[in-house]
Amino acid sequence: MGSKTDPSPVAVTNGSGLVELYSSHAKGLVRYVQREAGAKPDREELVPASVTMGSLAAVTGPSGHVTLFYLDQEGQVAAWSPERSLAPTPLGKAVGTGRLSVTRCLIDGFDCTVLAQQSGDGRLALAAYPSEQEAEGLSWSETGERQGNLATVLTRSLDGGLVAMAVADGGVPVATRQKVGAQGLLLEGWRSIG
């Protein structure tokens, strides 16, 4: 990929089961797409964008198309989804400076995309919107106790709810999950795991 590329690319499987790899370059975004099973991914043209390296996260939407999220150089969360003809588009101000995490889950029965980032005061901040409806923009809500330096991963539970896992200061793995039956996106308290 070259010496001016992001050291933390992201790979995701699209709705056809093929791999897409995303990275950033000093001049923009780079996408590699597998066109058939077992094939080597093809590199597409660089898309000009202002990207903060190390901030990439991607998710496959209900359409089967991938959306990439990243922080731009102005501190905005931006989204790019080439197969949906979504050019790199700012969605709203980031709540912190670290890497983003993203997944889809059910909120009040609706398929939603949820982004996470550590806020400036060390808490987990979440923003959710109906999947593939980026025009809704982002509104962040902080949750839980301060955890120090969080490295958070989001995933979807078997019942469709959100699960957040992180490694807090001191290397302690912690987790929280969406409260069952609660309206909106309410999380339980952090619990140590392991």
Image: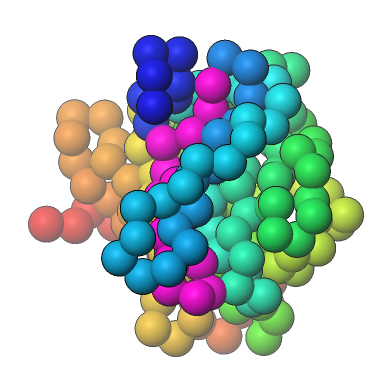
Q: Which residues are magenta?
A: 9-25
Q: Nearer the viewer, residue 102 or 38?
A: 38
Going by the image, does 80 lie left or right of 103? right
Residue 155 picture location, percent across and down: 42, 64
> In the rendered view, how is the structure colored?
rainbow
Is residue 37 a member of the stretch shown in magenta?
Answer: no
| Rendered view: 55 above or below 177 | above
Q: In percent of the image, x 47 and y 47: which residue is there?
A: 42
In the rendered image, which quarter contains the N terminus?
top left
In the rendered image, which quarter contains the C terminus?
bottom left
Most common SS among magenta residues: strand
Q: In percent of the image, x 48 and y 63: which residue is there?
A: 35
Residue 7 visible within the image:
yes
Q: In percent of the image, x 51 and y 67: which residue is there?
A: 14
- Number of numbered labels in the structure image: 0
Q: In the orientation shown, which residue stands out farthest toward the right?
A: 135
| Rendered view: 157 above or below 134 | below
Residue 96 lies in what quarter of the image? Answer: top right
Residue 169 picture location, percent across and down: 26, 30
Is residue 22 a member of the stretch shown in magenta?
Answer: yes
Q: Nearer the viewer, residue 185 or 4?
A: 4
Q: In percent of the image, x 22 and y 53: which residue is there?
A: 192
| Rendered view: 62 above or below 174 | below
Residue 109 picture location, percent across and down: 67, 86
Q: Nearer the viewer, residue 54 or 194?
A: 54
Going by the image, does 138 lie left or right of 152? right
Going by the image, does 26 lie left or right of 128? left
| Rendered view: 90 above or below 177 | above
Going by the image, does 123 lie left or right of 194? right
